[in-house]
Structure formats: C-alpha cells, structure tokens
Image (cartoon, grey):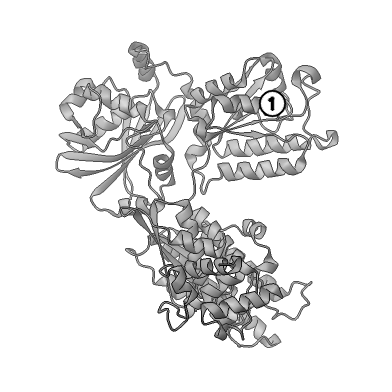
C-alpha cells in the first residue's frame, strides 16, 4: 500500500470507524450504509485537509467510492 | 486540531462510570464539524467525562435557545453568526442588498438581538451558558468600498457589542474573547463559501477548531494560580539596589527601563484582584525597605507580603512565603531575571512554575504579561479577593495552636471580638462558595470538586443544604471562608463537602461550625463523606482529634463526643437565610 493510499485509508477510517482496511478499499456509497450525505461532507473535508486539495462543487457528486476519491486525490496532488 | 484528529478524540472510549457532560450546541447553521471539534476539545480537557453534544434545528438559533429546559443539558453553547440576526447578512438567502434594504436589515438585526438576549439570559437561569458572537466577515452588502466602514456596518457592530456587554454582566454567561479569537484565527481565513453553499456550514476547519477550543476553555478551565513571588533587582525594577542605590534603580521611559514599570503596574493589578504577591530577593533588607519608601513605585509595599530579603538561597525565601500564605507550591508562580535562581527554586519546588523575567527583550516581556494574565485570570471577582492579603497579614499575629499553647490561644480568641455568620441557602450565583469548593486543598473533607453543572445539580436537589460561613474580628474581615454541603435526615446529617480557607485556621471556626450544626439542626449524629487526599491533613487532624483515633472511611461523630472534645468558643454568632 503506497503512502497516499495509506493516508486515504486513515481518512476513511476516521469517518467510518467500523470498517476494516479491506472494506475501506472496496467502500462505496452503495456498500456502506453509513455513507450518507453528512458522512460524505465530513469525508471530503477530512480528505481536503489531509491532502491540501479543494474539491470543486461539481466534482462532489462523483466521489462516491474509495477508488473514485483515490483517483481524484492522485490526479490533483500530482498536478 | 485537525478534523481527522478531532473525530478520533471525540470517539475515544471513556470509562463506563464516567459522568456525562451534556452539551447543547445552539447555532443557526449546520453544526457539522463545529460539533465534532467541540466534543473533541471538551474530551481533551475533561477526559473523565463522557461528552455528549446535541444540536437544534437549522436556521432557528433563537428558537433553539428558547427551547432549552431545566432538566436538559448541563451546558448550553450558543454560537451566533451574522445570518442569525438577519438572513440577508448571510449568503444562502436572496432577500436583497439594495440601498433601501439596508436600514431594514439593521432594524431587523436589532430586533433579533433583543430576542436572543432574552433567550440566552433565560437559558442561563437554568444552565451555565457560553456564547460566541459573530466571528465571520460581513458580506459585501454595503455601498462603501471595503477600505471604508459603512455606517450600517458600524451600527450592526455597535448592537453586537451592546449585546455582548449585557450578556457578560450575567453571572452564569461567559462570552468568548474576540481578541483571542483574532489571534488564533485570521479573519480572512474564516469563511468557507463553498461549504456554506453546499452544506450550510460556514466555517473553514481551522476556524471551527479555534472557536471550539475557546468555548472548551471557558466550559472546562483549570483554576487560576493563587500567588506570585517576584525578584527585585532587574525584575521589579531595573538595576542592582546594592550597587546603584535607592535613587539609581529605575522603571521609566526616559531611562529605557519602562518594562519594569509596566511589570509593577501589572503586579499591582494582580494584587488588587486578590492574587497574593510577595518578594524573594537577595538583598540588604534595610536597603529594600528604603527602596519601597520611594513614592514613584507603582506597586506599594502594602500590596507585597511578605517581602523576604536576605543573602541566602531564594528557595528559603520561597519556603517562608508559602508558609505565610499557607498555600501549596503548585499554586504559585516565581519570577526572576536569573536562570540560575529559577533553577535553584525549581529544584526545591519542582511543582512550582518558574518564569524568566526577560529584562532585555520587550517582545518576550509582553508575552510574559499575557501568560501571567492567563495563569491568574478569573471569571468573576469576589469581595473576598479584595481582603485576602489583609487577612493573611492579620493571621501573622495569631498565636500558634499546634504547639499546644491553648492558654494563649484562648486568651487571644477571647480578645479578638470575632463574629461568625452562618448562612443557609442555595444560590446558584454564589461564586465564592463555588470557588472555595474548587480551590481549597488543606481543610477539604475529601478533595472532591464540583463543576458548574454538578454544582447546579447539587443545589437543585431538594434533599441537600448549603451552609456558608463568614468571619470577622477586630483585625478585619476574612469574608466568606467556609462552605458545608450536606443532607439531613431526621436527627442525622451527612456532610458531602466541607472546605475552609487556610486563612481561617486557628480561630476555632471549624468547631463553631459543627456546634452550630448540632444545635440548630437538632442533630444526634453527623456522618462525614471523608476521604484522605495528599493535602487534607488539617481536616484529618481536626476530625481525628474529635474521634480520638485515626480516621477510616465511615466517619461518624455523635453530639456527645463532639461536645466532650470541643474547646472554649468565643465567637459572637449571627445566622441568616438566603435563597
């Protein structure tokens, strides 16, 4: 697991403390019952703070899984 | 604190038997991360409590506060933002920013502030209430360029200032300091427009964390220090008294020694607020006496007691001063310009905070003053604060009772013309009683403390009683010096809390208090919720002297055994009821 993925797992774990690492890597809005709108806002806030990125309003609806958030962060951190 | 850390702290497990701290967070916006940060900051400050934060309805700040009920939260936190005063002062509603709208916005905000004032004061009657007033920049609705303050903007700020001053005058309301918040959180980095638009949460994370930290510091604060011991040469004044002479020492602008004058002024301020201030100096005592005769000193020798000047180690002075004050080293700050002297005192009193006086660094000096204000800051001053030093001076004239010389003590007490006033009554805003319970260490039945929440709960319990004790003799008043909290069932009383200021020792006030309880409440027996602590030997010795044996957990004293051991009492008694 690379450093970025490790940090992202930690972000997800802070918002969804009941999930283990495997569940986090496979997490999505559909598979995690607790991933409601409030949790989504908290998750994105934690990710923004951790990686120093600003998620645009139009990007928010697309960040519905761990892999989607990971791709977003990889793209914007390396930019 | 970062949000990821706050989430972890807020979810940290606490002991099963931890007492709950129920916080009602009233705000008009989505509480979101402020709720998390507040829970985390309180959990950090009070790890033995289970912090439970609840919130109200979106967009109804005043209504949320008005709905607070007596048996509800332990603490109410009201966080006010501009849009709570009038929705047009926010950005989520499009009510209009035309020129003709501005007077109505100001009038409407004024009316809302009137409602908020009433609601917050109403909540404070039931529950300690903590308030943060608008912290965000106003939106660009005024017609002036940003460099110019608009008249409407100034009217709004004036109204908020009036509201703050009115609320701050209430004994159970605390307002967060805008100055402190300005230091912690720059104005330009507070507003998160995207978060406000998408989630109704207007704060940047760092700003939410700063507000939560400030509120938590008000809700769960450590008590202020009690005493300050200062050096003289190159500290209270500039120069070495033994070398420069009485006229050679200075503290003025024209001699570039003004920080010493500010320091004197600051110490005089502390002393006037009831902080004990004393001097520990390696100096010629006669020369020190002459120096304190200078009329231009900003702190007189009346405010400094004792003044201990000699050529021995400073720790000897500190030991004597602590004995005179009768307080513990961890309640005292020692200040000196010499790192070596600080180290010597610290080695002997490791629990004492020893601070360097930065005589050549004005910036560091400024930080020192701010640090001292934080260490000695009090929410409210009491009458006792103004007479504390006077009573300690008077105590120095008392003959010792611990040396067995009861004859001279009897004689002294008979001649003292002492009056003890017992007051029964439950007053939530009796800050002196609350303060005594939370800062008294030596004559303290069990070391248990009460926060504002548990204090209120105790007072609201109809089975409890509160007795406070005030004292005065021909040497001056001591003010309110003792508090007993307990319950009476038939002819038996159980004392849950009993504290008495160390300034009141050796006057047989403790015996008089028990005598009064036995006689006035027609008691056959008193049970004590006694627990030994590291420091409560004085009350342990007192109670042991009545019991005639070492104390155990189940401490009961009968009327017969008390009166058998009670020494002669000479006080005049007054009794009052309050509340």
Q: Residue furthest front?
A: A1
Left or right: B72 in relation to B229: left
Q: Secondary structure at mark 1?
A: loop
- Say whether residue B182 is left or right of residue B60: right
Q: Position of residue B177 (x, y in %)?
A: 59, 57
Residue B342 seen by the camera: yes
From the image, tell me which residue sits under label 1.
Answer: B232
Residue drawn at x 67%, y 68% is B189
Outermost right residue? B254
Residue at 40% over, 50% down? B451
Q: Position of residue B192 (x, y in %)?
A: 63, 74
Q: Quadrant of residue B296?
A: top right
Residue at (69, 44) in percent of width and height: B367
Q: Is residue B4 left or right of residue B545?
A: right
- Chain assignment, label 1: B
Q: Nearer the viewer, residue B232 or B305?
A: B232
**Where is B64 relative to B263, above or below?**
below
Task: Give whichever of B239, B114 is nearer the camera.
Answer: B239
Residue B431 image offset from top left, x and y in percent: 43, 46
Q: Residue at x 66, y 22 (%)?
A: B281
Task: State left or right for residue B74 relative to residue A65.
Answer: left
Q: Horizontal and vertical percent for residue B526?
A: 20, 35
User: In the image shown, does B482 or B556 lie closer to the viewer?
Assistant: B556
For the N terminus of chain B, give its image quadrant. bottom right
- Determine if residue B159 is in view: no
């Amino acid at each position: 697991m690379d450093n970025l993925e490790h940090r992202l797992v930690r972000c997800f774990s802070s918002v969804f403390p009941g999930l283990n690492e495997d569940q986090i890597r496979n997490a999505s809005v559909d598979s995690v019952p607790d991933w409601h709108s409030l949790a989504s806002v908290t998750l994105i806030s934690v990710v923004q703070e951790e990686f120093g990125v600003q998620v645009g309003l139009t990007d928010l609806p697309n960040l519905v899984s761990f892999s989607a958030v990971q791709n977003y962060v990889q793209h914007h951190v390396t930019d | 604190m970062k949000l990821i850390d706050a989430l972890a702290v807020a979810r940290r497990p606490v002991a099963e038997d931890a007492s709950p701290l129920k916080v009602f967070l009233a705000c008009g916006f989505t509480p979101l991360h402020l709720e998390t940060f507040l829970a985390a900051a309180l959990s950090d400050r009070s790890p033995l409590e289970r912090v439970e934060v609840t919130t109200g309805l979106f967009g109804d700040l005043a209504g949320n506060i008005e709905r607070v009920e007596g048996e509800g939260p332990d603490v109410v936190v009201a966080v006010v933002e501009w849009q709570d005063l009038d929705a047009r002062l926010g950005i989520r509603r499009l009510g209009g920013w035309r020129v003709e709208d501005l007077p109505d916005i100001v009038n409407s905000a004024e009316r809302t502030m009137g409602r908020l004032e009433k609601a917050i004061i109403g909540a404070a009657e039931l529950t300690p209430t903590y308030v943060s007033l608008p912290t965000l920049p106003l939106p660009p609705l005024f017609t002036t360029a940003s460099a110019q303050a608009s008249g409407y903007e100034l009217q709004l700020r004036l109204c908020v200032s009036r509201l703050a001053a009115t609320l701050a005058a209430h004994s159970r309301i605390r307002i967060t300091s805008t100055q402190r918040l300005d230091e912690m959180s720059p104005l330009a980095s507070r507003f998160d427009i995207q978060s406000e638009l998408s989630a109704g949460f207007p704060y940047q994370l760092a700003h939410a964390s700063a507000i939560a930290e400030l509120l938590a510091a008000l809700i769960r604060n450590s008590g202020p220090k009690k005493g300050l011991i200062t050096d003289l040469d190159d500290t209270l004044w500039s120069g070495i008294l033994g070398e420069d002479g009485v006229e050679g020492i200075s503290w003025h602008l024209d001699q570039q020694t003004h920080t010493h004058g500010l320091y004197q002024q600051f110490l005089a301020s502390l002393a006037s607020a009831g902080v004990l201030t004393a001097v520990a100096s390696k100096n010629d005592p006669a020369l020190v006496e002459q120096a304190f005769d200078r009329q231009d000193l900003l702190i007189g020798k009346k405010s400094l007691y004792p003044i201990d000047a000699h050529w021995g180690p400073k720790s000897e002075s500190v030991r004597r001063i602590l004995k005179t004050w009768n307080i513990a080293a961890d309640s005292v700050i020692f200040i000196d310009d010499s790192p070596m002297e600080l180290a010597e005192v610290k080695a002997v009193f490791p629990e004492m905070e020893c601070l360097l006086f930065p005589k050549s660094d004005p910036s560091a000096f400024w930080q020192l003053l701010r640090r001292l204000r934080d260490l000695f800051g009090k929410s409210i001053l009491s009458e006792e604060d103004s007479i504390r030093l006077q009573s300690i001076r008077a105590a120095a004239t008392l003959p010792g009772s611990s040396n067995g010389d009861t004859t001279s003590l009897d004689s002294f007490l008979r001649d003292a013309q002492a009056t003890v006033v017992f007051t029964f009554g439950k007053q939530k805003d009796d800050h002196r009683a609350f303060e005594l319970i939370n800062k008294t260490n030596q004559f303290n039945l069990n070391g248990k403390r009460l926060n504002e929440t548990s204090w209120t709960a105790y007072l609201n319990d109809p089975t409890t009683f509160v007795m406070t004790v005030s004292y005065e003799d021909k040497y001056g008043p001591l003010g309110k010096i003792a508090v007993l909290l307990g319950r009476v069932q038939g002819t038996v009383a159980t004392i849950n809390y009993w504290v008495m200021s160390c300034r009141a020792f050796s006057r047989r006030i403790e015996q008089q208090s028990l005598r009064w309880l036995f006689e006035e409440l027609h008691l056959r027996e008193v049970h004590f919720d006694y627990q030994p602590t590291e420091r409560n030997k004085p009350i342990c010795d007192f109670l042991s002297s009545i019991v005639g044996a070492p104390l155990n957990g189940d401490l009961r004293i009968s009327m017969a055994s008390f009166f058998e051991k009670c020494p002669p009492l000479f006080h005049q008694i007054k009794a009052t009821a309050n509340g």
